[in-house]
Amino acid sequence: MTHPLLSISKEVQAAFDNNQPVVALESTIISHGMPYPKNVEMAKTVEQIIRDNGAVPATIAIMDGKFKIGLEAEDLELLATAENVAKVSRRDLANVFATKQIGATTVATTMIGAKLAGIKVFVTGGIGGVHRGYEDHMDVSADLEELGQTDVTVVCAGAKAILDLPRTLEYLETKGVPVVGYQTDYLPAFYTRTSEYKLNLRSDSTAEIADMMHYQNELGLTAGILVANPIPEADEIPHEEIDSIITQALKEEKAAGIKGKDSTPFLLGKIVELTEGRSLETNIALVYNNAKVGAQIAADYNKK
């Protein structure tokens, strides 16, 4: 029986009925991550990549007091163009449902919606994490808490490079979240294929990750699995280039007094400006790459 707070698209419902693999997608990247119409083009391309790799896409948003599991064309257009779309994390969920606002889901809330719908794999760009300067403000993304308590496998290109990467890994370890490098031994740093931070786990095939998901279920473990998938080499921005840009963006953030949930959108926007749009193209490329891997994991898991 469908949860009363879910509205499922025809394509996704047909996938459920026919036991096809489904991959969840967030919607904040559409409403807050890039300009119109590039956001719509990106969203449609990501969905098609998932179809081309053996699964069915389910972009998740909040509309009319429900989780929309899979967006129709008109839903996507509305999300991409409407003003005052709420960026919804766990703390905001009940209020956005109660007030019937249009809400874009973050990593945390996409995981919640996916879990309610029975979707096991979710593809995003990069997760949130522990912000730099943690000792002064204790700013930690709700994404990490959600990964510790919601058993959805999240495919990403690592944590966003603006964050404190070693502290983010420590936090995930404390929460019991397996961080698996897909064909890599080191944590990808979003725009860059690698970092200096070695991971405890590596898988060289999507079938291995699907096996991990199976045993995570069998053991009754409630945490998610984080799959760290490096951006293709041709699309990365080298460390020495992006690090200086991030440092400049952080200085401007501090000068502007930006804090809390406004921090990440400000920094990513500033990095787009400082790279003259190159970082936006890199962001799109890594999402496309994650969609391919996520669809393959979902297809392998569906065979279990």
Image (spheres, rainbow, N blue to C red):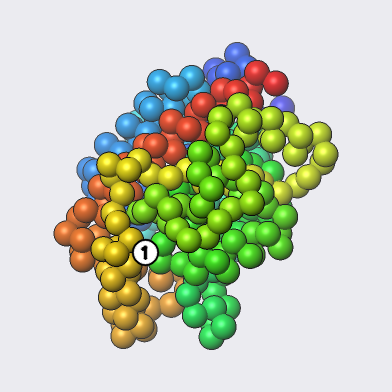
**Residue 240 located left or right of residue 131:** left
In this rendering, is residue 260 above or below 137? above
Three-letter amino acid code at disc 1? Pro
Observer-nearest residue: 68 or 175? 175
> Mark 1: few, some, or many residues within 10 Å (few <14, many ≥20)?
some
| Residue beneath the point at 58% across and 78% down | 138
Observer-nearest residue: 149 or 161? 161
Observer-nearest residue: 196 or 226? 196
Q: Residue 169: percent from the left, percent from the top? A: 59, 61
Q: Quadrant of residue 140?
A: bottom right
In this rendering, is residue 228 above or below 3? below
| Residue beneath the point at 22% across and 43% down | 37
Q: Quadrant of residue 269?
A: bottom left
User: Mark 1: which secondary structure?
Assistant: helix
Residue identifier under label 1: 265
Residue at the right extreme, as displayed: 219
**Residue 71 located left or right of residue 202:** left
**Residue 248 located left or right of residue 118:** left
Q: Residue 286: percent from the left, percent from the top? A: 37, 43
| Residue beneath the point at 47% across and 75% down | 132
Quarter of the image where the N terminus is located: top right
Quarter of the image where the C terminus is located: top right
